[in-house]
Amino acid sequence: MKKIKIEGLFPLAALVLLIIALSGQIFMVPPLGKILDPFTGLFRNGDDALLDAPAANITVHGVRHPVEVYLDERKVPHLFAQDVEDLYFAQGYVAASFRLWQMDILSYVAAGRLSEIFREGFLNQDRVQRRTGLPDAARASLASMEKEPETMAALLAYTRGVNAYIASLDYKSLPIEYKILDYRPEPWSPLKTVLIMKSMASLLSGYDDDLTMTNLMLAMGEKTFNKLYPNFDVHSAPVVPDSAGKVNEDLLYIRKPDYLDFSFLNTGSTVPSTEFNPKLGSNGWVVSGTKTGTAHPILCNDPHLNLSLPAVWMEMQLSTPGMNVYGVSIPGTPAVIIGFNRDIAWGLTNGADDVKDWYKLRVRDDYKKYFLDGRWLELPYSVEEIKRRGQRPVYDTIYHTVHGPIPYTKSFPGSQGLADHALRWELAHASNEIRTFLELARAKDYSEYRAAIRHYACPIQNFMFACKNNDIAVDHQGRMPVKWPGQGKFILDGTRSAHDYGRYIPEDSLPRLFNPACGYLFSANQQPTSQRYPYYYNGAFVGNRAQRIKDLLAGAQKFDVGSMQKMQLDNTNFFALTAAPVLLGLTDSNRLSVAERGWLGRMSRWKGKYDRNDELAPLFEKWWKNMRESTWDELRQYSFYAKTPDDRILLGLLQNEPENPYFDRIGTTQKETAKDLVLDAFKSAVAEIGKRRAEGRSEWGDYNTVSLMHISNLGLFSRLRIPSSGHPEAINAVSQKWGPSWRMIVELGERPKAYGIYAGGQSGTIGSPHYDQFVDDWNKGVYYDLHYYENPAEARAGATASWNIN
Amino acid sequence: MSDNVRTGLILSALLVFSRLVTAAPWWSYVIPAFGLGMYAAFRKWKTACLRVGFLTGFLVWVCADAWFQHSLHGGLFRLAGRAGGMAVFFASGIIGGLLSGLALYSGKSLLADKKSTLTI
């Protein structure tokens, strides 16, 4: 007879405890029992069964007619549907099949909900995200989209498609990230799509140097400020050149606003850190048939974004009767963002305008009232519930003023400089950018293109356009406020409603260029207009890439796809090309050693190329960095110093004012000139480069390594430190963690011929061959043929796999 | 056939079959393992439960890992490299072994009479 033994319960208890411990996250350790289970854990990930299956029949609820999906040799899906709702349903299903976790986590980031997934470390990020108003803006935008039937129909269809895919998942088939982070995907919603669009807009419109500029203006005075930090670069080629009309002096010289004095700015000077990267730019250009061998127009575009895995883009073709478009979409949103159809092609570059302004407030210590126009007003507030995983929710109070919300209250960590300031951000307003892309997909000519982009509000973008009838255009499109000179460049006075602005530059006065006589146009985040533009504006504009593009476009009579590819991969740094001769001219070779003279001789023959195997690019970089540091040593004395004058300013001083006091180093007895600094900077650079060469780093590729981080920042899921050609100031702007996220060249004609590549792979499945499939080719400068199929039969003939969604 | 071998073979089959029901929770295999432990006690098998359970669980888990990696084109090894992949295999095997061994042992301990032998 067997009996239950009491002591036999101890191993049983140990077993139960072990199961509990291995079933959930403990600190940062994922639920090991679940994820290391061979039958349902991470071992079941790593393949793309659906992508690799020759044929799949997918039965879902929600499509009226079967949708045919053909995957080509690079797993680009070509979708053929009978109507647009079925098409966007299928797009949602396909996007989720390829990239579910990516789109899901981006929606959490945008909504300020990361604390629901991660136990620690994201509460303040969530608070800032909500306080700056991005989730509110998404809700307001969605409310306005609900009044526009076409957008809403696409959004709802897309949502149903994503949810159909989510419903098909069990634990085994969940993307690996869900298993590691131990949560499940929640149902998709139109709000999540709008959140992703707003998040993308936020990435491109985060420029806010207002506090730094205010401090610099006050410390330097008007004249020096305008010299070192000019609002306008008259030597830069604008997007829309204009030689008519009178010069707008307000663009060229910024007067110190009357309200701006030290008593106004009596708060701390620490600027809260921002993730905005001013180098996130893009290139785009178009040549009409008058400049091409085939007499057809060619459009080129390479938007520069953070490089990540999975990549920000996903290629696809979307086709219904009356619409057939190919391009890249953002997973989580319907339509394609950059692409082409049978008649037109379009591309985007960031407008780089300042659309984010700060207002210094007078607020009572208890945050019950704030001061405006001589009166104390009630300070409205809302309370946000921030849910936290495994912990009680946090309730965060957000204060709202007439200017906008207050992102940083006094007690908010790291907010000294912008505490009790209100933020006015164009992004916060309701807008419907999705409509633009839905309409662009089926636009056939310039007028339909113009009608489509009218809906586009924020962030301001340069839309590049080409039509097969040889119309070409560029539009600086978005809501550009009418501002008084200097408004928004500096901190504004939040006690005056007069510092608000409510008017926008009329649509017909936005910078625009249509069919220029030269036969080409370009944009690369440079100033949108010439100095004759009648309205004041400011932004984070850069001119070197644009100038290089202009030189190349103006320097040749005829172009073809091959020459355009060479242009997109051009590693010449226009600034280095200009600055190197100036530095060489100021270098006294008699004061150099033999070895240093050898380097100087090689440098005199250098062409400013940042090729991966170039040995002189590291030397120039170091030389110029030394120059920058030794010249601007005075500025580094400022506690608030955060922004170096543009390199062109320093170059101008070297060329025109070699005796300028800024060349006199602080802390030395003798008075240095430009020549002294150039010589010392060179000697120091040669010594530094010598050391690096001894360590085995001799080529530019040893310095310019690019990393494609997984969105979770886990190195294991990333591609790290890939030696690369390029430079942020070269057309091929590859650098560290950002660069040309999508290279596209489209020649329109009887049938579009297109070429492209992005840094990544179609699949978001970690470990899949399609996860990072294009990275090495992208780094080598390879282009793929983009298969634009006219009908399902063509797509079927070129497919490696097909799905039937019914 | 020794009790150890017999128990190991039965346990292998139970582990595999229980986990083929992928809708069940990841730890579901401990239930048949526990039951087998009780059965071994009932039949007075002289099984070294902890050792046999651990070894069987470890082998079944590692073999299953290898099978899925092979059939799914080795994504893990592509990602983590050979050493990293082997480390994950090993960790997975340890968990499979530990729980199988403990479940078998618990089942047998719970029912064992004073005269039964528990060899560890």
Image: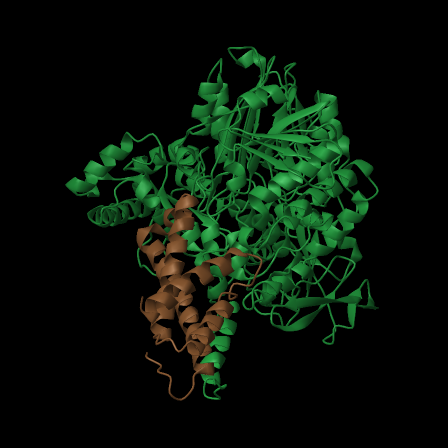
Residue toward you, A609 or A737: A737
- Residue at 49% x, 88% y: name it: A6
Location of residue A559 in the rendering, given as x and y in whole percent from the top left corner: 49, 16
Q: Which chain is brown?
A: B
Q: As rendered, which of A219 and A594 lies closer to the eye?
A: A594
Q: Is residue B18 left or right of residue B95?
A: right
Q: In terms of image quadrants, where is residue A231?
A: top right
Q: Is residue A181 visible?
A: yes
| Image x and y of residue A213, in percent | 58, 53
Q: Identify whether A353 is placed above or below A636.
A: above
Residue A239 appears anywhere in the view: no
Kindly identify the residue that appears in the image at 44 percent across and 45 percent down.
B72
Query: In terms of depth relative to the viewer, which is nearer, A728 or A420?
Result: A728
Percent position of residue A450, x then y = 73, 27
For residue A125, which quarter of the picture? bottom right
Chain A tint in image: green
